[in-house]
Image (cartoon, coloured by chain):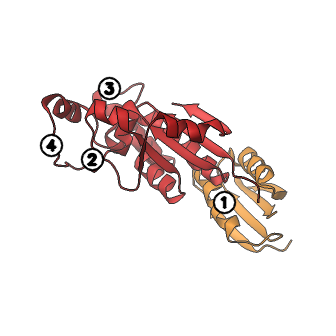
Chain colours: A orange, B red
Amino acid sequence: MNVDKVLDAKGLACPMPIVKTKKAINELEAGQVLEIHTTDKGAKNDLSAWAKSGGHDLLKHEEENSVLKFWIKKG
Amino acid sequence: MTEKKKTTIVLFSGDYDKAMAAYIIANGAAAYDHEVTIFHTFWGLNALRKDEDVMVKKGFLEKMFAKMMPKGADKMGISKMNFAGIGPKLIKNVIKKHNALTLPQLIEMAQEQDVKLVACTMTMDLLGLQQEELLEQIEYAGVAAYLADAEDGNVNLFI
């Protein structure tokens, strides 16, 4: 996958992952992909709801050593 | 571009934990691209107080109020287990441990995200608070201005 920007939000608590994601996606063009790393357990529900509401695509997510990774394509 | 959605929050409480909840929702809503307004009334006004002493002319009652109310967000008590001020110290430790934001940080973040912070002028009069004692870059309004924001709002909370 072609990733245009990586956001490290590890260790940050609610609401920071979503606030940082919003800031990062603002800097991208439509169609570009943002990769997000977070350790916030609520992030999966938070980011999928946020992406849907903003018209972005949550392409994929996975968990690796308790780090949650997400790929969001800007809509 | 479609019209932005709106979130309006009435912050009535002067409790640290309740104000934290209000500001977390406000920051989240701002990240959701909502236009966010927090309308501070009664004890919620204390979240907007500066933490320093501000010299303003006041009557006796107003001076008493000023002394008894917390000077700013950091000085607010918590709604449960306050234990005469030990509770807030404990909760601030826990906040630090979990890398969450403190209330003053949440307020700063909200201002950064252009959340509109409004002070209710009628309750400012009741509590004897003056503009000089509150944070810069906030707005002053009454119930009509709040309703104007809330009536076409999508999320509306009273905390």
Label 2 Cα crowd, 10 Å radius (few <14 / some 14-19 / many 20+): many
Q: Earlier in the sequence, mark 4 or mark 3?
A: 4
Q: Which residue is mark 1?
A: A22
> Do marks 3 and 1 share a chain?
no
Q: Is residue A15 left or right of residue B13?
A: right
Q: Chain of mark 4?
A: B
Q: CA distance from mark 3 to mark 1?
A: 38 Å
Front of the two marks 4 and 2? 4
Circle 2 sits on which residue? B133
For mark 3, does the 10 Å Cα neighbourhood hold few (<14), some (14 to 19), or many (20 or more) residues? few
Marker count (numbered): 4
Please identify, in this view, whether the residue under mark 3 or under mark 2 is nearer the observer: 2
- Mark with earlier residue (4, 2): 4
Residue that label 3 marks = B83
Type of the residue with mark 2: Glu
Residue B27, horizontal then vertical, whole percent: 57, 49
Q: Is residue B13 above or below residue B8?
A: above
Mark 4 neighbour class, 10 Å CA radius: few under 14, some 14 to 19, many 20 or more: few
Give the residue type that dot 1 points to: Lys
The chain ID associated with circle 2 is B
* Residue B35 image position (x, y, % from top left): 61, 50
Dot 3 or dot 2: first in sequence order is 3
Callouts 4 and 2 in the same chain: yes
How far is mark 4 from mark 1, CA to CA?
44 Å
Measuring 53% from the left and 51% from the top, which residue is drawn there?
Answer: B115
How far apart are the two marked residues, 1 and 2, measured between alpha carbons?
A: 33 Å
Q: Residues within 10 Å of mark 1 (few under 14, many from 20)?
A: some
Q: Are marks 3 and 1 in contact (CB under 8 Å)?
A: no
Query: Depth check: B3 or A70 in front?
Result: B3
Evaluate whether label 4 is on the same chain as label 3.
Answer: yes
Instruction: Please name the amino acid that badge 4 sits on.
Output: Lys
